Amino acid sequence: MMKKILMIATGGTIACCRSDAGLTPLLSCQELIDYVPASRSFCQVTGIQAFNIDSTNMEPEHWLTIAGLIEEHYEKYDGFVICHGTDTMAYTAAALSYLVQNSPKPIVITGAQKPIDMEITDAKTNLLDSLRFASCPRAHGVAIVFDGKVIAGTRGKKERTKSYNAFSSINFPYIAVIQEEHILFYLDDKDRCTGPVSFCRTLNPKVGLLKLIPSSSADLLDYMAGRYDGVIIESFGVGGLPSYKSGDFRQSISRWIGLGKTVVMTTQVTNEGSNMSIYEVGKNIKEEFGLLEAYDMTLEAAVTKLMWILGRTKDPEEIRRLFYKTINHDILWHG
Ligand code: ASP
């Protein structure tokens, strides 16, 4: 039976045209669909233009709009494909993993490194692969499809700015690979998706990021307390906080926790995750303030998960419980 797919276009390079001002997303959703006539042999695609922006301009409001469109049309379609810029695609995929949970239907996010109207481009392959995966009865949940790989929505990271293999799956295997018309599953677990699909309609965008460098001052953290309800501190290696003179992070962390705000520690190192309990620079301060830690989660997942959680609760115990709950394969281990 022909699958019914809803394609939601949001802009990005895939929809770009050249102009004097640089590449700008101008192609419509229907124009994108028309570039992949081969999809007509296995699915029937309906298009919605959510917006047409460079994903540099993506904000949490846009994620809510995309999730809202999926919710509104959920019953009528077998799968969903979101065309998106690559720059913030990993954030959107992670955000949708929290906004739309337990979906037995596939929700695929894709884009391209080259516009679809160029002679040499990855756009047509990525779009066709995405429609194919979204039409597959064994596929489910939120995933990125790019360069023949299917990556769990919480595990993607843009690691290359120009090559076709722009995305990696961090600390987690690919869900599947797509070769021509074949989908080879490495993780074939649709039978474990039992609960009903659930949609969330709120996010708290007041989440900040502080990336440490040697010399970072804790003043930055104090400043951020005035603007954010939660902060993610990207530390070094497995994780720690400086205690040198110009950066008394202990004081600032104490202030954050005293204000009832959330502090999450993570690492700048892409692979293998954090574990603050290893070194003295991490262990003591973590225990003293009960800091949360992202462990093997990506930064993109940690940021959007915190926005999702802080949109639901202010209770520290509930925040901790939700943060360590595995959603769409986002965290495999926590101490
Ligand atoms: N700047 C573009 C965007 O993220 C890049 C891309 O789509 O590849 O919208």
Image (spheres, grey):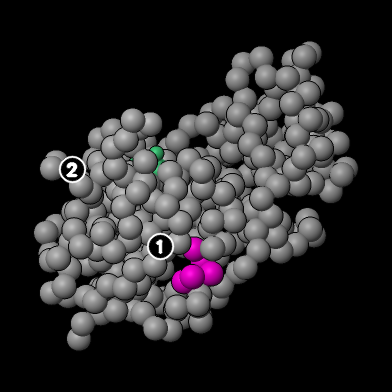
- The spot of residue 146 in percent (x, y) is 28, 51
Find the magenta span and give its range.
66-70
- 76 lies left or right of 100: left
The residue where tag 2 is placed is: 118
Classify 10 Å Cα crowding around label 1: few (below 14), some (14-19), many (20 and above).
Answer: some
Q: Residue placed at 43% from the left, 84% from the top?
A: 75
Element under label 1?
A: strand
For this orientation, the residue located farthest to the front is 20
- The spot of residue 145 in percent (x, y) is 30, 56
Q: CA distance from mark 2 to mark 1?
A: 21 Å
Element under label 2?
A: loop
- 331 lies left or right of 278: left
Q: Residue placed at 35% from the left, 72% from the top?
A: 6
- 65 lies left or right of 255: left
- 2 versus 211 height, above or below: below
In the rendered image, the quadrant that contains the N terminus is bottom left
Q: Is the residue under label 1 in contact with that under label 2 (CB below 8 Å)?
A: no
Question: Quadrant holding ligand 1?
Answer: top left
